[in-house]
Amino acid sequence: MKKVVITGVSTGIGYSSAKILCNAGYIVFGSVRNEKDAKRISLELGDNFHALIFDVRNSDQIREESKKVKNSLKNDECIAGLVNNSGIAL
């Protein structure tokens, strides 16, 4: 099963992308900033969604959560895609 990582899946483009890919059979590792969003989205998107909880400005959190993705990869498997969607409007 193909695996992708999407940052910023709480709302908008990130959420829609995660939903489409989960429904298409992909495993989606999606980043959110808090446990509340992680639980909500996990319930909405089902077993193909795996929450990563971090703020994109915190490199320690990113490193820690990235271990979940790395540990899910078997043998020579790699992620099928990375969508860097997180950001702020200025």
Image (cartoon, rainbow, N blue to C red):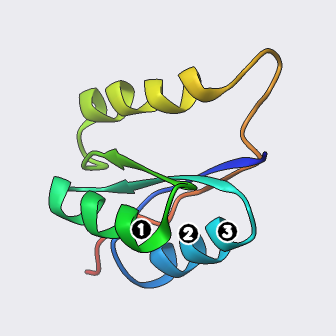
Within 10 Å of the Cα at label 3, are there few (<14), some (14-19), or many (20+) other Cα atoms? some
Q: Position of residue 47 (x, y in %)?
A: 52, 55
**Number of the label disc, if any, that sits on residue 9:** 1
Quarter-of-image position of residue 70: top right
Mark nearer the viewer, 1 or 3: 3
Kind of residue at disc 2: Ala
* Residue toward you, 19 or 87: 19
Kind of residue at disc 1: Val
Within 10 Å of the Cα at label 2, are there few (<14), some (14-19), or many (20+) other Cα atoms? many
Query: Decide: marks 2, 1 in contact (CB < 8 A)?
Result: yes
Q: Position of residue 49 (x, y in %)?
A: 51, 56
User: Visible in this render: residue 87?
Assistant: no
User: Visible in this render: residue 52?
Assistant: yes
**Residue at coordinates 16% horizontally, 62% vertically from top-left?**
36
Residue that extends furthest to the top in the rendered view of this protein: 75
Query: Image check: 77 left or right of 38?
Result: right
Identify the element where label 3 is drawn: helix
Kind of residue at disc 3: Leu
Q: Position of residue 43 (x, y in %)?
A: 36, 67
The numbered mark, 1 or 3, whose residue comes first in the sequence reads 1
**Residue at coordinates 45% horizontally, 58% vertically from top-left?**
7
Looking at the image, residue 45 lies above or below residue 79: below
Quadrant of the image containing the C terminus:
bottom left
Name the residue that disc number 2 marks.
18
Identify the element where label 1 is drawn: loop
Name the residue that disc number 3 marks.
21
Query: Decide: marks 1, 3 in contact (CB < 8 A)?
Result: no
Query: Image check: 52 left or right of 30?
Result: left
The alpha-carbon separation of the residues under discs 3 and 2 comes to: 5 Å
Looking at the image, residue 61 lies above or below residue 87: above
Query: Decide: marks 3, 2 in contact (CB < 8 A)?
Result: yes
Q: Position of residue 59 (x, y in %)?
A: 30, 32
